[in-house]
Image: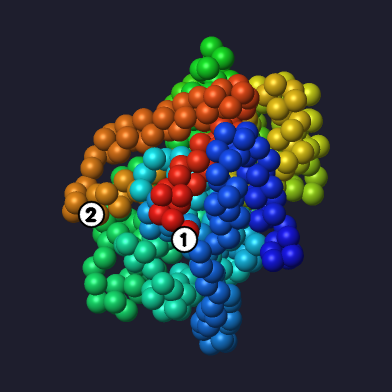
Amino acid sequence: IRRNAGEAEFHQAVREVLESLGRVVAKHPHYLELALIERICEPERQIIFRIPWVDDKGQVQINRGFRVQFNSALGPYKGGMRFHPSVNVGIIKFLGFEQTFKNALTGMPIGGGKGGSDFDPKGKSDAEIMRFCQSMMTEMFRHIGEYTDVPAGDIGVGGREIGYLFGQYKRLTNRYEAGVLTGKALAYGGSRARTEATGYGNTYFTQAMLQKTGTDFDGKKVVVSGSGNVAIYTIEKVQSFGGKVIACSDSSGYVIDENGIDLALLQDIKEVRRGRISDYVKRKGAGASFIAADKGSIWDVPCDVAMPSATQNELSGKNARKLVANGVIAVGEGANMPTTPDAVKVFQDAGVMFAPGKAANAGGVATSALEMQQNASRDSWSFAQTETRLATIMRDIHDTCYETADEYGEPGNYVMGANIAGFVRVAEAMRMMGVI
Ligand code: NDP
Protein backbone atom coordinates (compact mmCIF):
# COMPACT_ATOMS: atom_id res chain seq x y z
CA ILE A 1 0.00 0.00 0.00
CA ARG A 2 2.88 2.37 0.80
CA ARG A 3 4.54 1.67 -2.54
CA ASN A 4 1.31 2.56 -4.35
CA ALA A 5 0.15 5.39 -2.10
CA GLY A 6 -3.02 7.20 -3.12
CA GLU A 7 -3.91 4.73 -5.87
CA ALA A 8 -7.38 3.81 -4.57
CA GLU A 9 -8.69 2.10 -7.70
CA PHE A 10 -5.50 0.05 -8.05
CA HIS A 11 -5.80 -1.12 -4.43
CA GLN A 12 -9.45 -2.02 -5.04
CA ALA A 13 -8.67 -4.09 -8.15
CA VAL A 14 -5.75 -5.91 -6.51
CA ARG A 15 -7.68 -6.65 -3.33
CA GLU A 16 -10.54 -8.13 -5.33
CA VAL A 17 -8.21 -10.54 -7.12
CA LEU A 18 -6.21 -11.44 -4.00
CA GLU A 19 -9.43 -12.30 -2.15
CA SER A 20 -10.01 -15.03 -4.72
CA LEU A 21 -6.57 -16.59 -4.47
CA GLY A 22 -6.65 -18.38 -1.09
CA ARG A 23 -7.69 -21.68 -2.67
CA VAL A 24 -5.17 -21.27 -5.50
CA VAL A 25 -2.30 -20.89 -3.06
CA ALA A 26 -3.54 -23.90 -1.10
CA LYS A 27 -3.38 -25.94 -4.31
CA HIS A 28 -0.10 -24.46 -5.63
CA PRO A 29 1.97 -23.53 -2.53
CA HIS A 30 5.08 -22.98 -4.69
CA TYR A 31 3.44 -19.78 -6.03
CA LEU A 32 4.24 -18.23 -2.65
CA GLU A 33 7.90 -19.31 -2.71
CA LEU A 34 8.25 -17.90 -6.21
CA ALA A 35 6.67 -14.60 -5.08
CA LEU A 36 4.35 -14.87 -8.06
CA ILE A 37 1.58 -12.85 -6.45
CA GLU A 38 3.93 -9.97 -5.58
CA ARG A 39 5.48 -10.07 -9.05
CA ILE A 40 2.10 -10.04 -10.81
CA CYS A 41 1.00 -7.00 -8.78
CA GLU A 42 4.04 -4.96 -9.86
CA PRO A 43 3.91 -3.51 -13.40
CA GLU A 44 6.90 -4.39 -15.56
CA ARG A 45 7.23 -0.76 -16.66
CA GLN A 46 5.39 2.54 -16.18
CA ILE A 47 5.93 5.46 -18.51
CA ILE A 48 4.67 8.94 -17.59
CA PHE A 49 5.26 11.79 -20.00
CA ARG A 50 4.46 15.39 -20.97
CA ILE A 51 2.04 16.06 -23.84
CA PRO A 52 2.32 19.69 -25.00
CA TRP A 53 -0.09 20.83 -27.71
CA VAL A 54 -1.52 24.06 -29.12
CA ASP A 55 -5.27 24.76 -28.94
CA ASP A 56 -7.34 26.58 -31.57
CA LYS A 57 -6.69 29.93 -29.87
CA GLY A 58 -2.95 29.46 -30.17
CA GLN A 59 -2.59 28.73 -26.46
CA VAL A 60 -0.11 26.06 -25.36
CA GLN A 61 -1.73 23.30 -23.29
CA ILE A 62 -0.03 20.59 -21.25
CA ASN A 63 -1.44 17.20 -20.41
CA ARG A 64 0.06 14.16 -18.80
CA GLY A 65 0.39 10.88 -20.69
CA PHE A 66 0.63 7.36 -19.26
CA ARG A 67 1.48 3.93 -20.56
CA VAL A 68 1.65 1.15 -18.00
CA GLN A 69 3.18 -2.01 -19.45
CA PHE A 70 1.87 -4.40 -16.86
CA ASN A 71 2.66 -7.94 -17.84
CA SER A 72 4.10 -9.53 -20.97
CA ALA A 73 4.18 -13.18 -19.88
CA LEU A 74 1.60 -14.20 -22.48
CA GLY A 75 2.42 -11.80 -25.31
CA PRO A 76 3.01 -8.14 -26.16
CA TYR A 77 1.35 -5.68 -23.78
CA LYS A 78 -2.18 -5.03 -25.00
CA GLY A 79 -4.83 -2.66 -23.73
CA GLY A 80 -6.61 0.59 -24.47
CA MET A 81 -5.88 4.28 -24.08
CA ARG A 82 -8.28 6.40 -22.02
CA PHE A 83 -8.72 10.16 -22.50
CA HIS A 84 -10.64 11.58 -19.53
CA PRO A 85 -9.88 14.32 -16.98
CA SER A 86 -10.09 11.76 -14.15
CA VAL A 87 -7.12 9.77 -15.50
CA ASN A 88 -4.16 9.32 -13.13
CA VAL A 89 -1.56 6.65 -12.59
CA GLY A 90 -3.75 4.71 -10.13
CA ILE A 91 -6.58 4.44 -12.65
CA ILE A 92 -4.27 3.31 -15.44
CA LYS A 93 -2.63 0.76 -13.13
CA PHE A 94 -5.98 -0.70 -12.07
CA LEU A 95 -6.98 -0.97 -15.70
CA GLY A 96 -3.64 -2.56 -16.68
CA PHE A 97 -3.87 -5.06 -13.84
CA GLU A 98 -7.41 -6.09 -14.81
CA GLN A 99 -6.36 -6.21 -18.44
CA THR A 100 -3.64 -8.76 -17.73
CA PHE A 101 -6.14 -11.34 -16.42
CA LYS A 102 -8.79 -10.43 -18.98
CA ASN A 103 -6.36 -11.00 -21.82
CA ALA A 104 -5.30 -14.30 -20.28
CA LEU A 105 -8.95 -15.39 -20.16
CA THR A 106 -9.34 -14.83 -23.90
CA GLY A 107 -6.79 -17.58 -24.53
CA MET A 108 -5.05 -15.33 -27.07
CA PRO A 109 -1.29 -14.55 -26.99
CA ILE A 110 -1.52 -11.07 -25.46
CA GLY A 111 -0.06 -9.55 -22.31
CA GLY A 112 -1.64 -6.70 -20.36
CA GLY A 113 -1.13 -2.93 -20.54
CA LYS A 114 -3.10 0.27 -20.41
CA GLY A 115 -2.56 3.96 -21.05
CA GLY A 116 -4.15 7.31 -21.51
CA SER A 117 -4.14 10.93 -20.55
CA ASP A 118 -5.98 13.44 -18.38
CA PHE A 119 -6.88 15.23 -21.63
CA ASP A 120 -10.62 16.00 -21.85
CA PRO A 121 -11.85 15.51 -25.42
CA LYS A 122 -15.25 17.09 -24.66
CA GLY A 123 -15.78 20.31 -26.58
CA LYS A 124 -12.48 20.04 -28.48
CA SER A 125 -12.39 20.59 -32.25
CA ASP A 126 -11.22 17.87 -34.63
CA ALA A 127 -8.02 19.83 -35.21
CA GLU A 128 -7.31 20.02 -31.47
CA ILE A 129 -7.91 16.29 -31.09
CA MET A 130 -5.50 15.66 -33.97
CA ARG A 131 -2.75 17.88 -32.56
CA PHE A 132 -3.12 16.30 -29.15
CA CYS A 133 -2.94 12.75 -30.56
CA GLN A 134 0.10 13.65 -32.66
CA SER A 135 1.90 15.10 -29.66
CA MET A 136 1.07 12.07 -27.55
CA MET A 137 2.38 9.67 -30.18
CA THR A 138 5.57 11.72 -30.59
CA GLU A 139 6.60 10.42 -27.19
CA MET A 140 4.78 7.11 -27.15
CA PHE A 141 6.04 5.71 -30.46
CA ARG A 142 9.40 4.70 -28.98
CA HIS A 143 7.71 2.50 -26.37
CA ILE A 144 5.22 0.58 -28.53
CA GLY A 145 5.26 -1.80 -31.50
CA GLU A 146 3.66 -4.88 -32.97
CA TYR A 147 5.89 -7.15 -30.86
CA THR A 148 6.15 -4.84 -27.84
CA ASP A 149 2.96 -3.07 -26.91
CA VAL A 150 -0.25 -2.63 -28.91
CA PRO A 151 -2.58 0.14 -27.65
CA ALA A 152 -6.27 0.49 -28.57
CA GLY A 153 -9.28 2.64 -27.60
CA ASP A 154 -11.14 3.09 -24.33
CA ILE A 155 -13.17 5.97 -22.84
CA GLY A 156 -12.73 9.04 -25.06
CA VAL A 157 -10.68 7.15 -27.66
CA GLY A 158 -12.52 5.79 -30.69
CA GLY A 159 -11.83 5.39 -34.39
CA ARG A 160 -11.01 9.07 -34.95
CA GLU A 161 -8.32 9.17 -32.26
CA ILE A 162 -6.81 5.83 -33.32
CA GLY A 163 -6.55 7.22 -36.87
CA TYR A 164 -4.60 10.28 -35.75
CA LEU A 165 -2.36 8.20 -33.48
CA PHE A 166 -1.65 5.68 -36.23
CA GLY A 167 -0.94 8.39 -38.81
CA GLN A 168 1.67 9.95 -36.53
CA TYR A 169 3.25 6.57 -35.69
CA LYS A 170 3.62 5.79 -39.39
CA ARG A 171 5.16 9.17 -40.04
CA LEU A 172 7.66 8.97 -37.18
CA THR A 173 8.79 5.41 -37.86
CA ASN A 174 8.49 5.32 -41.66
CA ARG A 175 6.94 1.88 -41.23
CA TYR A 176 3.48 0.71 -42.20
CA GLU A 177 3.16 -1.39 -39.10
CA ALA A 178 -0.57 -2.09 -39.10
CA GLY A 179 -0.35 -4.31 -36.01
CA VAL A 180 0.91 -1.52 -33.72
CA LEU A 181 -2.58 -0.27 -32.84
CA THR A 182 -6.02 -1.89 -32.91
CA GLY A 183 -9.42 -0.35 -33.35
CA LYS A 184 -8.31 1.00 -36.73
CA ALA A 185 -10.86 1.86 -39.42
CA LEU A 186 -11.46 -0.77 -42.10
CA ALA A 187 -9.85 1.54 -44.67
CA TYR A 188 -6.35 1.00 -43.20
CA GLY A 189 -6.22 -2.41 -41.55
CA GLY A 190 -9.06 -2.49 -39.06
CA SER A 191 -11.16 -5.52 -38.32
CA ARG A 192 -14.84 -5.89 -38.98
CA ALA A 193 -16.83 -6.27 -35.74
CA ARG A 194 -14.16 -4.58 -33.56
CA THR A 195 -16.39 -1.55 -32.94
CA GLU A 196 -19.23 -3.80 -31.85
CA ALA A 197 -17.14 -6.41 -30.04
CA THR A 198 -17.19 -5.33 -26.39
CA GLY A 199 -20.94 -4.73 -26.25
CA TYR A 200 -21.74 -7.83 -28.29
CA GLY A 201 -19.32 -9.86 -26.20
CA ASN A 202 -20.88 -8.83 -22.88
CA THR A 203 -24.28 -9.72 -24.28
CA TYR A 204 -23.04 -13.16 -25.39
CA PHE A 205 -21.50 -13.77 -21.97
CA THR A 206 -24.61 -12.63 -20.08
CA GLN A 207 -26.82 -14.71 -22.37
CA ALA A 208 -24.69 -17.79 -21.62
CA MET A 209 -25.02 -17.07 -17.90
CA LEU A 210 -28.80 -16.68 -18.17
CA GLN A 211 -29.01 -19.91 -20.16
CA LYS A 212 -27.26 -21.76 -17.33
CA THR A 213 -30.41 -21.18 -15.28
CA GLY A 214 -32.75 -22.01 -18.13
CA THR A 215 -33.64 -18.51 -19.25
CA ASP A 216 -32.37 -15.90 -21.75
CA PHE A 217 -32.75 -12.26 -22.84
CA ASP A 218 -36.03 -12.81 -24.65
CA GLY A 219 -38.71 -10.55 -23.17
CA LYS A 220 -36.44 -9.24 -20.40
CA LYS A 221 -36.28 -5.59 -19.36
CA VAL A 222 -32.70 -4.39 -19.51
CA VAL A 223 -30.94 -1.24 -18.28
CA VAL A 224 -27.60 -0.30 -19.87
CA SER A 225 -25.64 2.59 -18.38
CA GLY A 226 -23.49 4.81 -20.59
CA SER A 227 -24.14 5.60 -24.24
CA GLY A 228 -20.65 5.23 -25.66
CA ASN A 229 -19.07 2.46 -27.67
CA VAL A 230 -19.75 -0.37 -25.23
CA ALA A 231 -23.29 0.71 -24.32
CA ILE A 232 -24.48 1.23 -27.90
CA TYR A 233 -23.46 -2.20 -29.13
CA THR A 234 -24.75 -3.86 -25.98
CA ILE A 235 -28.13 -2.30 -26.69
CA GLU A 236 -28.01 -3.50 -30.30
CA LYS A 237 -27.22 -7.12 -29.39
CA VAL A 238 -29.64 -7.30 -26.46
CA GLN A 239 -32.40 -6.06 -28.76
CA SER A 240 -31.49 -8.69 -31.36
CA PHE A 241 -31.84 -11.34 -28.63
CA GLY A 242 -35.38 -10.12 -27.88
CA GLY A 243 -34.53 -8.05 -24.78
CA LYS A 244 -36.05 -4.62 -24.24
CA VAL A 245 -33.53 -1.94 -23.25
CA ILE A 246 -35.51 0.75 -21.48
CA ALA A 247 -32.79 3.10 -20.17
CA CYS A 248 -29.30 4.38 -20.91
CA SER A 249 -27.21 7.35 -19.75
CA ASP A 250 -24.20 9.62 -19.95
CA SER A 251 -22.51 11.63 -17.23
CA SER A 252 -25.27 14.28 -17.35
CA GLY A 253 -28.13 11.88 -16.53
CA TYR A 254 -30.25 9.09 -17.96
CA VAL A 255 -33.21 8.56 -20.28
CA ILE A 256 -36.07 6.11 -19.89
CA ASP A 257 -38.01 4.97 -22.91
CA GLU A 258 -40.55 2.31 -21.96
CA ASN A 259 -41.08 1.50 -25.65
CA GLY A 260 -37.44 0.48 -25.88
CA ILE A 261 -34.46 2.68 -26.71
CA ASP A 262 -34.49 3.81 -30.36
CA LEU A 263 -31.00 2.70 -31.35
CA ALA A 264 -30.80 4.59 -34.65
CA LEU A 265 -31.67 7.83 -32.86
CA LEU A 266 -29.17 7.15 -30.06
CA GLN A 267 -26.40 6.43 -32.59
CA ASP A 268 -27.15 9.61 -34.50
CA ILE A 269 -26.92 11.65 -31.29
CA LYS A 270 -23.80 9.98 -29.91
CA GLU A 271 -21.81 8.68 -32.88
CA VAL A 272 -22.61 11.32 -35.50
CA ARG A 273 -23.38 14.54 -33.60
CA ARG A 274 -21.43 13.81 -30.39
CA GLY A 275 -24.39 15.23 -28.45
CA ARG A 276 -25.81 14.74 -24.95
CA ILE A 277 -28.26 12.06 -23.81
CA SER A 278 -30.96 14.69 -23.08
CA ASP A 279 -31.10 15.29 -26.87
CA TYR A 280 -32.76 11.87 -27.09
CA VAL A 281 -35.86 13.12 -25.26
CA LYS A 282 -35.93 16.38 -27.22
CA ARG A 283 -36.02 14.44 -30.47
CA LYS A 284 -38.11 11.43 -29.39
CA GLY A 285 -40.87 13.39 -27.66
CA ALA A 286 -43.70 11.52 -25.92
CA GLY A 287 -42.87 8.28 -24.12
CA ALA A 288 -39.29 9.18 -23.22
CA SER A 289 -38.06 11.12 -20.21
CA PHE A 290 -34.72 12.53 -19.05
CA ILE A 291 -33.58 12.52 -15.41
CA ALA A 292 -30.54 14.65 -14.58
CA ALA A 293 -27.64 12.95 -12.77
CA ASP A 294 -28.22 14.94 -9.56
CA LYS A 295 -31.93 13.98 -9.52
CA GLY A 296 -31.66 10.20 -9.56
CA SER A 297 -29.73 7.12 -10.61
CA ILE A 298 -30.26 4.91 -13.64
CA TRP A 299 -30.14 1.97 -11.21
CA ASP A 300 -33.49 3.11 -9.73
CA VAL A 301 -35.14 1.92 -12.96
CA PRO A 302 -36.69 -1.55 -12.38
CA CYS A 303 -35.21 -4.19 -14.69
CA ASP A 304 -34.44 -7.90 -15.02
CA VAL A 305 -30.88 -7.45 -16.26
CA ALA A 306 -28.47 -4.58 -15.49
CA MET A 307 -25.47 -3.97 -17.75
CA PRO A 308 -23.22 -1.19 -16.37
CA SER A 309 -21.23 0.06 -19.36
CA ALA A 310 -19.96 3.55 -18.45
CA THR A 311 -17.10 3.69 -15.92
CA GLN A 312 -15.57 2.35 -12.70
CA ASN A 313 -17.53 2.40 -9.43
CA GLU A 314 -20.72 3.67 -11.06
CA LEU A 315 -22.93 1.10 -9.28
CA SER A 316 -22.82 1.39 -5.46
CA GLY A 317 -24.08 -0.85 -2.66
CA LYS A 318 -27.16 1.37 -2.38
CA ASN A 319 -27.81 1.05 -6.11
CA ALA A 320 -27.40 -2.74 -5.85
CA ARG A 321 -29.92 -2.99 -3.00
CA LYS A 322 -32.41 -1.02 -5.09
CA LEU A 323 -31.86 -3.28 -8.11
CA VAL A 324 -32.33 -6.38 -5.95
CA ALA A 325 -35.51 -4.94 -4.40
CA ASN A 326 -36.76 -4.31 -7.93
CA GLY A 327 -36.17 -7.95 -8.90
CA VAL A 328 -32.95 -7.91 -10.96
CA ILE A 329 -31.81 -11.46 -11.82
CA ALA A 330 -28.49 -10.85 -13.61
CA VAL A 331 -25.74 -8.23 -13.93
CA GLY A 332 -23.21 -8.20 -16.79
CA GLU A 333 -20.36 -5.71 -16.46
CA GLY A 334 -19.53 -4.02 -19.78
CA ALA A 335 -17.33 -1.40 -18.16
CA ASN A 336 -14.19 -2.11 -16.12
CA MET A 337 -14.95 -2.48 -12.40
CA PRO A 338 -18.25 -0.52 -12.56
CA THR A 339 -19.66 -2.33 -9.51
CA THR A 340 -18.22 -1.40 -6.11
CA PRO A 341 -17.09 -4.30 -3.87
CA ASP A 342 -20.04 -3.85 -1.48
CA ALA A 343 -22.43 -3.89 -4.43
CA VAL A 344 -20.91 -7.15 -5.73
CA LYS A 345 -21.51 -8.64 -2.29
CA VAL A 346 -25.16 -7.47 -2.29
CA PHE A 347 -25.71 -9.22 -5.62
CA GLN A 348 -23.96 -12.41 -4.61
CA ASP A 349 -25.76 -12.61 -1.25
CA ALA A 350 -29.09 -12.15 -3.04
CA GLY A 351 -28.30 -14.91 -5.55
CA VAL A 352 -28.16 -12.51 -8.52
CA MET A 353 -26.01 -13.89 -11.36
CA PHE A 354 -23.00 -11.61 -11.68
CA ALA A 355 -20.61 -11.47 -14.65
CA PRO A 356 -17.39 -9.56 -13.79
CA GLY A 357 -15.99 -7.18 -16.41
CA LYS A 358 -12.64 -8.89 -16.73
CA ALA A 359 -14.51 -11.84 -18.25
CA ALA A 360 -17.70 -10.31 -19.65
CA ASN A 361 -16.11 -7.36 -21.47
CA ALA A 362 -13.16 -9.32 -22.89
CA GLY A 363 -14.78 -9.45 -26.34
CA GLY A 364 -13.23 -6.12 -27.30
CA VAL A 365 -9.66 -7.11 -26.67
CA ALA A 366 -10.27 -10.59 -28.10
CA THR A 367 -11.39 -9.01 -31.36
CA SER A 368 -8.37 -6.69 -31.19
CA ALA A 369 -6.26 -9.85 -31.11
CA LEU A 370 -8.20 -11.05 -34.16
CA GLU A 371 -7.35 -7.70 -35.80
CA MET A 372 -3.67 -8.39 -35.05
CA GLN A 373 -4.04 -11.83 -36.64
CA GLN A 374 -5.56 -10.31 -39.77
CA ASN A 375 -2.80 -7.68 -39.93
CA ALA A 376 -0.08 -10.32 -39.52
CA SER A 377 -1.49 -12.42 -42.34
CA ARG A 378 -2.44 -9.38 -44.45
CA ASP A 379 -5.98 -10.67 -44.52
CA SER A 380 -9.43 -9.22 -43.91
CA TRP A 381 -12.23 -11.40 -42.63
CA SER A 382 -15.97 -10.96 -43.16
CA PHE A 383 -18.18 -9.58 -40.39
CA ALA A 384 -19.89 -12.95 -39.96
CA GLN A 385 -16.59 -14.84 -39.69
CA THR A 386 -15.23 -12.40 -37.12
CA GLU A 387 -18.42 -12.35 -35.07
CA THR A 388 -18.56 -16.14 -35.08
CA ARG A 389 -15.02 -16.23 -33.64
CA LEU A 390 -16.05 -13.64 -31.02
CA ALA A 391 -19.14 -15.63 -30.02
CA THR A 392 -17.05 -18.80 -29.62
CA ILE A 393 -14.43 -16.96 -27.55
CA MET A 394 -17.10 -15.50 -25.24
CA ARG A 395 -18.74 -18.90 -24.80
CA ASP A 396 -15.31 -20.37 -23.94
CA ILE A 397 -14.57 -17.61 -21.42
CA HIS A 398 -17.96 -18.16 -19.82
CA ASP A 399 -17.39 -21.91 -19.57
CA THR A 400 -13.86 -21.44 -18.21
CA CYS A 401 -15.11 -19.14 -15.43
CA TYR A 402 -18.03 -21.39 -14.64
CA GLU A 403 -15.94 -24.56 -14.52
CA THR A 404 -13.11 -22.95 -12.55
CA ALA A 405 -15.56 -21.70 -9.92
CA ASP A 406 -16.90 -25.23 -9.66
CA GLU A 407 -13.43 -26.77 -9.46
CA TYR A 408 -12.44 -24.44 -6.62
CA GLY A 409 -15.62 -25.12 -4.64
CA GLU A 410 -17.56 -21.91 -5.40
CA PRO A 411 -20.17 -22.98 -7.96
CA GLY A 412 -21.81 -20.07 -9.80
CA ASN A 413 -19.24 -17.53 -8.51
CA TYR A 414 -18.04 -16.02 -11.79
CA VAL A 415 -15.88 -13.46 -9.96
CA MET A 416 -13.83 -16.19 -8.37
CA GLY A 417 -13.82 -18.28 -11.55
CA ALA A 418 -12.50 -15.38 -13.65
CA ASN A 419 -9.88 -14.29 -11.13
CA ILE A 420 -8.51 -17.78 -10.60
CA ALA A 421 -8.51 -18.87 -14.24
CA GLY A 422 -6.86 -15.62 -15.38
CA PHE A 423 -4.30 -15.64 -12.58
CA VAL A 424 -3.26 -19.26 -13.06
CA ARG A 425 -2.64 -18.78 -16.80
CA VAL A 426 -0.35 -15.80 -16.20
CA ALA A 427 1.34 -17.35 -13.15
CA GLU A 428 2.10 -20.60 -14.97
CA ALA A 429 3.73 -18.76 -17.89
CA MET A 430 5.81 -16.67 -15.48
CA ARG A 431 6.85 -19.74 -13.48
CA MET A 432 8.11 -21.45 -16.63
CA MET A 433 10.14 -18.39 -17.66
CA GLY A 434 12.04 -18.18 -14.37
CA VAL A 435 12.43 -15.13 -12.17
CA ILE A 436 11.39 -12.35 -14.54
P1 NDP B 1 -16.90 5.82 -24.40
O1 NDP B 1 -16.05 6.99 -24.19
O2 NDP B 1 -17.31 5.45 -25.78
O3 NDP B 1 -18.24 5.96 -23.55
C1 NDP B 1 -18.22 6.13 -22.17
C2 NDP B 1 -19.63 6.37 -21.68
O4 NDP B 1 -19.63 6.35 -20.26
C3 NDP B 1 -20.18 7.73 -22.09
O5 NDP B 1 -21.59 7.64 -22.22
C4 NDP B 1 -19.79 8.61 -20.89
O6 NDP B 1 -20.61 9.76 -20.72
C5 NDP B 1 -19.98 7.65 -19.75
N1 NDP B 1 -19.06 8.02 -18.66
C6 NDP B 1 -17.70 8.06 -18.71
N2 NDP B 1 -17.19 8.48 -17.55
C7 NDP B 1 -18.25 8.70 -16.76
C8 NDP B 1 -18.38 9.13 -15.44
N3 NDP B 1 -17.30 9.44 -14.69
N4 NDP B 1 -19.64 9.22 -14.92
C9 NDP B 1 -20.71 8.90 -15.68
N5 NDP B 1 -20.66 8.49 -16.95
C10 NDP B 1 -19.45 8.39 -17.47
O7 NDP B 1 -16.15 4.60 -23.68
P2 NDP B 1 -16.36 3.04 -23.88
O8 NDP B 1 -17.79 2.74 -24.16
O9 NDP B 1 -15.33 2.55 -24.80
O10 NDP B 1 -15.97 2.49 -22.43
C11 NDP B 1 -16.93 2.30 -21.38
C12 NDP B 1 -16.36 1.36 -20.34
O11 NDP B 1 -16.09 0.08 -20.95
C13 NDP B 1 -15.05 1.78 -19.68
O12 NDP B 1 -15.03 1.30 -18.35
C14 NDP B 1 -14.02 1.01 -20.49
O13 NDP B 1 -12.81 0.83 -19.77
C15 NDP B 1 -14.74 -0.29 -20.71
N6 NDP B 1 -14.25 -1.11 -21.81
C16 NDP B 1 -14.23 -0.62 -23.09
C17 NDP B 1 -13.79 -1.43 -24.12
C18 NDP B 1 -13.87 -0.99 -25.54
O14 NDP B 1 -13.63 -1.83 -26.43
N7 NDP B 1 -14.22 0.24 -25.85
C19 NDP B 1 -13.26 -2.77 -23.87
C20 NDP B 1 -13.42 -3.22 -22.50
C21 NDP B 1 -13.86 -2.39 -21.52
P3 NDP B 1 -20.00 11.21 -21.05
O15 NDP B 1 -19.90 11.24 -22.55
O16 NDP B 1 -21.00 12.15 -20.49
O17 NDP B 1 -18.65 11.28 -20.38
The residue pinned by badge 2 equals 376
| Along the viewing direction, whichever of 223 and 377 lies nearer the viewer | 377
Disc 2 crowd, CA 10 A, few/some/many (<14, 14-19, 20+): few
Label 1 vs 2, first from the N-terminus:
2
Tell me the mark number nearer the camera, choosing from 1 and 2. 1
| Along the viewing direction, whichever of 74 and 385 lies nearer the viewer | 74
The residue located at (55%, 44%) in the rendering is 30
| Along the viewing direction, whichever of 327 and 279 lies nearer the viewer | 327
Left or right of 162: which side holds 308?
Answer: right
Three-letter code, disc 1:
Ile
The residue located at (60%, 55%) in the rendering is 38
Kindly report the distance in space between the C-alpha atoms of the residues bearing marks 1 and 2: 28 Å
Residue 208 location (% of width, % of height): 49, 23
| Along the viewing direction, whichever of 101 and 224 lies nearer the viewer | 101
Image vertical order of residue 26 relative to residue 164, above or below: above
Residue 42 location (% of width, % of height): 58, 60
Residue lying furthest top in this view?
214
Left or right of 257: which side holds 368?
Answer: left
Residue 424 location (% of width, % of height): 50, 41
Left or right of 324: which side holds 257?
Answer: left
- Whether residue 219 is visible, yes or no, is yes
Query: Helix, strand, or loop for circle 2?
Result: helix
- Where on the picture, by quarter, is residue 183? bottom left
- Where on the picture, by quarter, is residue 247? top right
Image vertical order of residue 275 relative to residue 127, above or below: above
The residue located at (53%, 87%) in the rendering is 58
Three-letter code, disc 2:
Ala
Image vertical order of residue 228 relative to residue 153, above or below: above
Image mark for residue 436: 1
Query: Helix, strand, or loop for circle 1?
Result: loop
The residue located at (51%, 59%) in the rendering is 70
